[in-house]
Structure formats: C-alpha cells, structure tokens
C-alpha cells in the first residue's frame, strides 16, 4: 500500500494530488492560471512560474485536507520532471524536493507525456494493465504540447510511431481560435462554437493523409502536421471578410469545419496504426482528448473488437493525479530520483513505459 503526494507545474496549471496504489485518487486539486495568461493569448513562461510559486503551497494543503491525510501518512513525493516550460517545472520540482527532504521521503521524477497516458487508467481497476490481452496498446496523446502515437507491447517496450512535425493538435486549435477571435484556450471554445455548425460547408485540408493528390511517404504515415490547416484558416477568414459573409452562422460553420479536419486526421492515423499493428487497446489522452467530437468519432469508427480507453475529461487536461498514479509503478520498484534531479524541456525518446 502506497500513498503518494504528487505535484504538477509543467505549464499553466498548479496541481497537487494524493493517489493510493496507483489508481485510487483521494484528492486532485488544480489551480488554473488561464485567466492570468488569457490577455496574452497564450502561456507566458515567467508569469506561469510566478503563479506556481503562489499556488503550490495552497494546492498541496488542499489536497492533503481533501484526502484527510497528513504528510506523516505519505510514502513518496512525485513531481513532473518534463517535458514542459523550464521556469514552470523548476517551481514544482524545487517544492517537491523541499517536501521530500523535510519529511525524509523518496522523490520520484515523472515524465509528463507518459503521465497523460496513465490518466486513462485512474479510478479504474489496474487489472487491464496486467492483462496480456490488452496489448499491443496504442496511445494517442493529444495536448497543447504533444500529438503522438505510441505503440506499447505486453513487455512494456514502447515505440513512437509518429508525432507532429510542427504544431500540436491543441496548439492548432488554440491558434485557430485566436484567429477567429474566440479567446484562450482555444480547444474548449472551438468545440462550443462548432456545436451547431455545419462541418461540411467549408472544407479544410487533411495534411499528411495522402489527400489533395499528394503522395504520403512511408516515414510520414503516422506523422502529423497541423500548420497547414491553420494557414488554410487564415486564407479562409480573409476571403470570407472580402466577401462580407462573416456572420454568426459563418463562425459556427468555420469552427465546425476546422475542428472536423483536426479530428479527422487524428482518427484516420490512429485507425491506420490499429490495422497495421494488430492493436488490441486504444488509449486517447491529453487535453484535446476532452474534445467531444474526437471522443464521438473515435468511438464510432474504432472496430468493436478493439478496446477503447478514453481518459476521463478531468484527467485529460493537466493534473497531478496522473503524476501520482504513474509514480506508484516507480515506487513499487524502488526507483527513486536524486535530490539533484533536473528538469527537462523536450520529450526524450521513449523506449518503455513504467506501468506495464
Ligand atoms: O494536456 P493539456 O492541459 O496541457 C498540455 O500538456 O499541453 O492540454 C491543453 C490543450 C490546449 O491546447 C487546449 O486548447 C486543449 O488541450 N483542449 C481542448 C479541449 N479542452 C482542452 N481541445 C479540444 N477540445 C476541448 N474540449
Ligand atoms: Zn499536459
């Protein structure tokens, strides 16, 4: 039995959680900084770091209070080590080091990208991870920083089939929403605006899917590119302004068409990987996995014999529960980090996952 205090500060959410045995979330507190960054139209790293400085203590105290435990009950302190914004990561890491040292607890540095995948398994029976029939497992990680397909074998070996060559899916939605003056963050507002829109009225490109007469090279079979969709949106807005057709209906139809293009590319590539690699389970995780249209289309199109694990929306966007959940697997193997642990900004090559 292990009770882990976990912390997350990689971007614009300061979060703390208490997770028992890698699955039971006793508390998950998230202090969002969205309102502070919104006027800038995106996350400002130094501002994020300063906000984390203010929020780390109260979110941790709240998590302990909600879980009804004290630091004396905790077995380890886990913290997001990267990838993320370095100034932001350093705040959480330093805080975690202080708590760990003062309470003589082991420290566990966690990969944020893998933690997102683990978010799909929180509050559920971990038997699915132990069952060999679950594999090969394919994880589609879609967030503001990542768009990636990771293939995971029954021995825990992992291989990234593809990733984005430019913008992440969430980044494309955020930039698209900015272009349409919808506000920040773009994903949720794009979804709301698209709700009653006609996605077929305006056609947006599906980059790297072999459409538009362009051959898809084998190395790009599982890669993504979203910057072209964003540029197409820019030209569409200019043309529509010139034609004087930018009314409420135009906005809804534009958002629906743009969202549909992003979702279509994500689902198509996932289905290709499922077919080519005999995938038995698909996991969809990361902030964009909140998207209702993505959840609907993947549920409809995935063959019935393939299991689908959609991360619960509260564990899609950044949170500390996913960090505390995955850290349990390092705790079990007594794989702890040094107190000299450093942050990392970019995703290292993933060759295995700790939770299989
Ligand atoms: O996982 P996350 O909180 O942070 C990163 O690790 O990047 O993901 C944030 C991203 C943002 O780009 C945001 O616009 C997107 O997730 N997002 C959504 C939705 N909710 C959040 N995108 C589409 N539809 C949503 N409902
Ligand atoms: Zn994230």
Image (spheres, grey):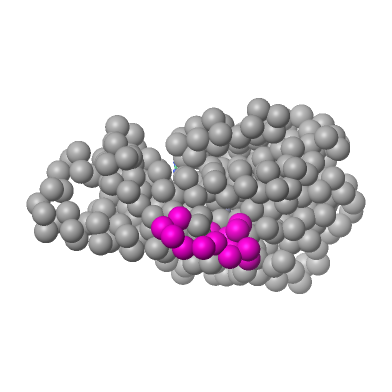
Residue 301 place in picture, x, y as percent: 56, 34
**Viewer-closest of 11 and 273:** 273
| Rendered residue at 67%/40% (across/down) | 282
In the image: residue 255, left or right of residue 317: left
Q: Quadrant of residue 340?
A: bottom right
Q: In x, y percent, where is residue 152?
A: 76, 49
Q: Position of residue 345 (x, y in %)?
A: 61, 69
Give whichever of 151, 302 is nearer the camera.
302
On screen, residue 70 above or below 208: above
State the quadrant of the C terminus.
top right
In magenta segment, residue 212: yes
In the displayed orientation, state which residue is furthest to the right. Answer: 333
Residue at x 11%, y 58% (from the top left corner): 242
**Compared with residue 315, is residue 100 higher up or lower down, i.e. above or below?**
below
Residue found 79% across the figure and 33% down from its top: 128
Q: In the image, which residues are magenta?
A: 211-224
Residue 105 occupies quadrant: bottom right
Q: Relative to residue 321, is residue 356 drawn left or right?
A: right
| Predominant secondary structure, magenta span | loop
Q: State the count of labels.
A: 0
Q: Nearer the viewer, residue 333 or 194?
A: 194
Coordinates of residue 355 in the picture (x, y in percent): 80, 46
Query: Residue 8 or 164: which is nearer the viewer?
Result: 164
What residue is rendered at 39% in x and 55% in y?
205
Q: Is residue 126 magenta?
A: no
Confirm whether residue 355 shows in the render.
no
Q: Indicate the quadrant containing the N terminus: top left, top right, bottom left or bottom right.
A: top right
Q: Is residue 304 visible?
A: yes
């Amino acid at each position: 039995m292990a009770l882990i205090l976990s912390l997350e500060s990689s971007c614009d959410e300061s979060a703390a959680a208490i997770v028992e045995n890698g699955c039971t979330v006793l508390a998950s507190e998230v202090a969002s900084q969205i309102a502070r960054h919104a006027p800038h139209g995106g996350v400002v790293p130094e501002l994020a770091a300063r906000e984390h400085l203010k929020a780390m203590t109260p979110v941790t105290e709240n998590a302990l209070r909600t879980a009804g435990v004290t630091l004396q009950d905790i077995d380890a302190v886990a913290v997001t080590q990267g990838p993320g914004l370095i100034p932001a990561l350093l705040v959480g890491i330093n805080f975690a080091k202080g708590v760990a040292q003062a309470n003589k607890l082991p420290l566990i540095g966690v990969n944020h990208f893998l933690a997102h995948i683990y978010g799909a398994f929180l509050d559920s029976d971990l038997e699915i991870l132990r069952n060999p029939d679950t594999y090969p497992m394919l994880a589609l990680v879609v967030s503001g920083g990542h768009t990636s397909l990771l293939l995971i074998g029954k021995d825990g070996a992992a291989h990234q089939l593809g990733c984005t060559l430019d913008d992440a899916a969430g980044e494309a939605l955020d930039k698209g929403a900015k272009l349409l003056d919808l506000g920040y963050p773009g994903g949720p507002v794009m979804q709301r605006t698209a709700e009653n829109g006609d996605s077929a009225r305006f056609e947006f490109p599906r980059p790297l899917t072999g459409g538009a007469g362009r051959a898809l090279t084998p190395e790009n079979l599982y890669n993504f590119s979203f910057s072209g969709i964003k540029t197409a949106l820019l030209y569409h807005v200019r043309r529509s302004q010139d034609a004087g057709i930018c009314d409420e209906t135009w906005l809804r139809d534009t958002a629906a068409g743009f969202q549909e293009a992003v979702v279509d590319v994500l689902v198509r590539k996932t289905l290709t990987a499922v077919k080519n690699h005999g995938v038995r389970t698909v996991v969809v995780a990361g902030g964009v996995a909140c998207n209702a249209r993505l959840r609907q289309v993947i549920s409809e199109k995935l063959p019935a014999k393939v299991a689908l694990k959609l991360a619960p929306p509260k564990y899609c966007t950044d949170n500390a529960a996913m960090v505390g959940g995955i850290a349990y697997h390092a705790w079990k193997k007594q794989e702890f980090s040094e107190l000299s642990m450093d942050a990392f900004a970019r995703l290292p090559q993933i060759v295995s996952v700790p939770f299989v």
